[in-house]
């Protein structure tokens, strides 16, 4: 194994720390979060039902960065910087320093997380540091990056590595915590904005000034997501195993398919960033829809590439397998999990919601109606799968 | 890419020095309108208190801009009050200058150490001391300023108040010194019909540390990091 110099881990975490520090200093000087918006809008207009499309991204949450609290965030950023520099000078306590970087950069999220980029860089730098001298691309977080970049070679190493099953299980849990937390937090705040009983000043503070509300019930969603994630992972792996091995005739194993599927979920973790952006009232459901679509499409692409490597089939067959397996999985998901957790509020009983979201106040739901459309959609997918050669033996 | 091991330490110390020098000319404490009140009133107002005992204040309301700069002495009633206020700023300044001088000395010691002379222990000690002084400086002013703020006649220079303002605006604009009960703080938007419903319950004025204060605080953190690095940097592997 090629031993890497610690420069890359150092530079990443150092750059992350600097960005976190700059973000916090700007917040300190403004006395308010850094807000980037699509343009100016009259305050009275932003919560009207006829408001035009307007969005804002808040780097920092207002209630968390006011007053003397900012000192705490500056100290946290200094700890990240110190750990990065200490590692470069004496890389002996790499695990402690890497952990410190990861923990304190995560803690910087309420203070903007270094415009998000700083947070990501610091976490990757800390992760690389933790596993140093392993080459960056072979580290746990390095694999995340490679999956996100749709690098097919990462799946070859996942298929061969026995240790990867533990990592796969950890990935599933991590991705679902992040996604559940993002969706739960956003849903709770969007729900407050949409709720007619919420004081207008509260809704305004969330929408215009980067405030964010927290409640313990937000944690329900990540806990639920993690609870059902492992079962869903096994179901999807089982479906893909049947299609890949029994129908296509590939010589893969259930465990290998499981590893590949777990890592393909990585893009879903980006849903964590949902609460950083809010829009004018009529578009509050639009932003999650965009993020859901992008991350799920990304996941599907990762899955296609992963299965191509794992089943050793053509890209077309892999795509067909994902189409047909994904549809069966989606239907199972709706029939088992959505029914188990109830039909979410705001959707009609005949609607099939895409996401099984427990009933948080004003939870954002998407659905495809009517059910006939869903069955037609699945039929088209099966035809596509046939055309792509899924039912032709390997 | 090869980076010398002492480079980050030197860079940190240089940034700390620059931050500390800049802080002399930057405000240390400021009182300003909150984002809600700025939006509700379509204007801005702020007063910045510098370490050199000068208050710089500006106000823009309905396209009417006023800018004024005056010594803190103009905002006090008596020489006794002025002495009490000046002593806080002078002590803060003295602490900061001491920290600045020690930072310079520590930088020289590190450079000497890099050139081969064994000065590492001295450098660590002096850098730690400089960091401690620069850490204490902002904390000192944070603790002391609210105790003397009541001795001011007004926190916002009265020249900023527009001619013949409506009574509600006059009362709102003139934050009283007795309201300043802490280094950080705020006053609420009054429930006057002049303010839109969405802005009520929000802050009107908010006060707290300004750029100079934050730069010195950050400089102290950098020097603490530098001290920890110096203690390891010249140890032979």
Image: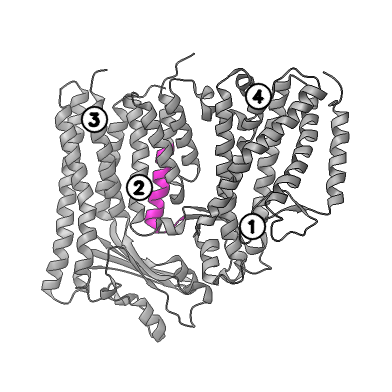
Look at the numbered disc 4 and give the secondary structure of its residue: helix
Q: Nearer the viewer, residue A242 or A278?
A: A242
Q: CA distance from mark 1 to mark 3?
A: 55 Å
The residue lying at 33 percent from left, 45 percent from top is A75
Q: Chain of mark 4?
A: A
- The kind of secondary structure the magenta stretch mainly shows is helix
SS category of the residue bearing label 2 = helix
Same subunit: marks 1 and 3: no
Q: Is residue A17 magenta?
A: yes
The reply to whether callout 3 and callout 2 are in contact (CB within 8 Å) is no
- Mark 3 lies on residue: B230
Name the residue that disc number 2 marks: A74
Q: Residue at x 87, y 22 (%)?
A: A392
- Most extreme residue toward the top is A1
Which numbered disc covers residue A176? none
Q: Residue A167's spot in the image, x, y percent?
A: 55, 28
Question: Crowding at label 3, few (<14), some or many (≥20) Cα neighbours within 10 Å?
Answer: many
Q: Nearer the viewer, mark 2 or mark 4?
A: 4
Q: Which of B39/A238 is in front?
A: A238
In this view, the residue farthest toward the front is A340
Q: Chain of mark 3?
A: B
Query: Badges 2 and 4: C-beta atoms under 8 Å apart?
Result: no
Relative side of A167 to B152, left or right: right
Residue placed under numbered mark 1 in the picture: A359
Q: Chain of mark 2?
A: A
Question: Quarter of the image containing the C terminus of chain B?
Answer: top left
């Amino acid at each position: 194994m090629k031993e890497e110099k610690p420069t890359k881990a150092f530079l990443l975490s150092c750059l992350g720390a600097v960005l976190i520090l700059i973000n916090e200093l700007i917040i300190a000087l403004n006395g308010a979060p850094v807000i980037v918006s699509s343009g100016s809008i009259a305050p009275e207009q932003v919560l009207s039902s006829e408001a035009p499309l307007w969005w804002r991204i808040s780097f920092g949450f207002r209630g968390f960065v006011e007053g003397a609290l900012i000192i705490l965030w500056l100290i946290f950023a200094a700890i990240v910087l110190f750990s990065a520099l200490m590692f470069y000078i004496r890389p002996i306590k790499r695990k402690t320093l890497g952990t410190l970087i990861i923990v304190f950069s995560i803690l910087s999220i309420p203070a903007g997380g270094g415009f998000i980029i700083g947070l990501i860089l610091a976490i990757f730098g800390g992760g690389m540091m933790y596993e140093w001298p392993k080459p960056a691309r072979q580290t746990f977080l390095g694999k995340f990056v490679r999956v996100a970049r749709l690098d097919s070679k990462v799946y070859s190493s996942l298929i061969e590595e026995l240790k990867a099953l533990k990592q796969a299980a950890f990935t599933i849990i991590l991705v679902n915590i992040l996604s559940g937390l993002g969706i739960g937090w956003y849903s709770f705040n969007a729900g407050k904005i949409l709720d007619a009983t919420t004081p207008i000043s509260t809704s305004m503070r969330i929408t215009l000034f980067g405030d964010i509300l927290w409640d313990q019930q937000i944690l329900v969603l990540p806990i639920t997501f993690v609870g059902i994630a492992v079962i869903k992972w096994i179901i999807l792996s089982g479906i893909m195993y049947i299609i890949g091995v029994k129908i296509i005739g590939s010589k893969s194993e259930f465990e290998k398919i499981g590893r590949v599927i777990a890592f393909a979920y990585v893009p879903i973790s980006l849903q964590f960033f949902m609460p950083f952006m809010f829009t004018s009232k009529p578009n509050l459901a639009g932003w999650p829809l965009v993020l859901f679509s992008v991350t799920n499409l990304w996941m599907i692409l990762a899955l296609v590439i992963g299965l191509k490597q794992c089943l050793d089939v053509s890209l077309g067959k892999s795509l067909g397998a994902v189409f047909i397996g994904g549809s069966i999985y989606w239907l199972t998901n709706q029939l088992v999990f959505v029914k188990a957790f109830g039909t979410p509020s705001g959707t009609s009983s005949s609607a099939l919601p895409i996401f099984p979201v427990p009933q948080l106040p004003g939870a954002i739901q998407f659905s495809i109606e009517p059910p006939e459309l869903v069955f037609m959609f699945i039929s088209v997918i099966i035809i596509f799968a046939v055309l792509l050669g899924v039912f032709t033996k390997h | 890419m090869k980076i010398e091991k002492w480079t980050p330490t030197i860079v940190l110390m240089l940034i700390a020095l620059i931050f500390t020098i800049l802080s002399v000319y930057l405000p240390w404490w400021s009182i300003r309108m909150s984002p809600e009140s700025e939006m509700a009133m379509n204007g801005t107002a702020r007063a910045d208190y510098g370490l050199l005992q000068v208050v710089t204040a500006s106000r823009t309301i309905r396209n009417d801009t006023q800018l004024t700069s005056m010594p803190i002495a103009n905002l006090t009633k008596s020489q006794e009050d002025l002495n009490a206020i000046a002593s806080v700023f002078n002590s803060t300044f003295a602490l900061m200058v001491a920290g600045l001088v020690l930072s310079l000395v520590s930088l020289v010691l590190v450079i000497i150490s890099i050139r081969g002379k064994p000065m590492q222990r001295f450098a660590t000690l002096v850098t730690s001391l400089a960091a401690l002084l620069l850490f204490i400086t902002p904390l000192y002013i944070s603790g002391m300023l609210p105790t003397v703020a009541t001795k001011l006649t007004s926190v916002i220079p009265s020249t900023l108040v527009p001619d013949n303002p409506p009574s509600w605006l006059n009362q709102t604009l003139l934050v009283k010194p007795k309201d300043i009960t802490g280094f950080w703080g705020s006053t609420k938007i009054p429930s006057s019909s002049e303010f839109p419903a969405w802005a009520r319950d929000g802050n009107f004025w908010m006060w707290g540390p300004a750029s100079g204060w934050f730069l010195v605080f950050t400089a102290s953190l950098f020097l603490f990091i530098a001290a920890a690095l110096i203690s390891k940097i010249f140890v032979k592997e």
